[in-house]
Amino acid sequence: MIIRLVPGVKATGHLKFSRCPTVLCYEMTVQKMKKNRVIKFESKERILQKARSYVESVETFFDESDRAIALLLKAMKLADRDLKREIMLLLGSFAKETVVWPLYDLMTDPSENEEIRHDAAIQLSVIGPLLKNSQLLVDRLLQEIGCTDTQRRLHATFAIGWEGNFLAATSLIERLFDSDSEVQQTAVNALCNLRDDRILDLLLDRLNHGPFEQKRIILFNLWRFYSKREKVTQVYIKCLDDENAELRFDALVCLGPITEVRNHVDMYRKCLKDKDGRIRELALKRLAEEASDAVRESCRAEIQALLDDPDMKVKRAAVRFLSKNGE
């Protein structure tokens, strides 16, 4: 091959010649790239290690916030469930606007672990009301609620239930009649989370006519209607007469946090004679722990009768009650 030099131009460096000018050009270009360009690559292990350092130290996260957020978003795709959950919590607390759509993608990804999809739905329900503009998220979740895939409906139903999100009410009410019982129960939770007192009567109707598991989940959520506490209390008391022992027990459990024993002594004395041993035992414990000396004294005869109760747990509770009162 013959090389013609341009007059006045001094040849410098070393050229590797080839019979093909194209190959010569390629080899020279590759040599130049190797000298001038370094490709940076972070391994999965390195990304996860750094992510853990941010999760363990909020100070480090704040010091490197821009880089930290970008890296944590990468790590969220690679991490195991425990670390992924920690990353969701951290970004959900300090980078809501940035993490909302990665969370949505996790929640709707059918290849993702169901527990992780549920974790993502939880975080969306937490950050939803805190976004500057949540309308786009609400619109997308409403689409998901109406889809044919049960798991997608389930997670979206959970995610959209945040306080004040009244736009979701109609779609959530429809889900009370979903073909899947788990979606129905999740819809009850989500509706109660809206904190809309107008929904209470609808839930009470489902308490009378809905399937058993839906009734139970409604009972455990009625306490959320703070301004309707007296009405809710009466609903619980009425349920103590239900023929189903599970519902009676659930109602008594729910009464504890919202009522005072001294205001419902006759109700508790009635529970001491319930057919279900769990109810008798719980009534005994409440009277022993919360009732006044005068009330406990008035119940002495009923308590002494329980020393012969066929349920050993009830017997022990009766013994403790009487021992506490000096017998």
Image (cartoon, rainbow, N blue to C red):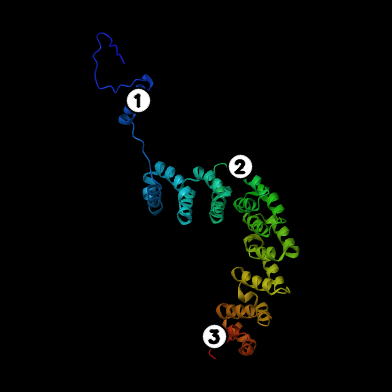
Counting from the top left corner in percent of width and height, residue 300 is at: 62, 88
The residue lying toward the viewer, choosing from 22 and 79, is: 22
Q: Which residue is mark 2?
A: 135
The residue lying toward the viewer, choosing from 24 and 259, is: 24
Q: Is residue 282 above or below residue 305?
A: above
The tag on residue 224 is none
Count of labels in the image? 3
Are dots 3 and 1 in contact, CB under 8 Å?
Answer: no
Q: Considering the numbered disc 2 on the image, is that residue within a helix, a strand or a loop?
A: helix
Are dots 2 and 1 in contact, CB under 8 Å?
Answer: no
Q: Is residue 229 visible?
A: no
Q: Which residue is mark 3?
A: 320
Counting from the top left corner in percent of width and height, residue 116 is at: 53, 54
**Mark 2 residue type:** Gln
| Residue 312, quarter of picture | bottom right
Q: Which residue is mark 1?
A: 29
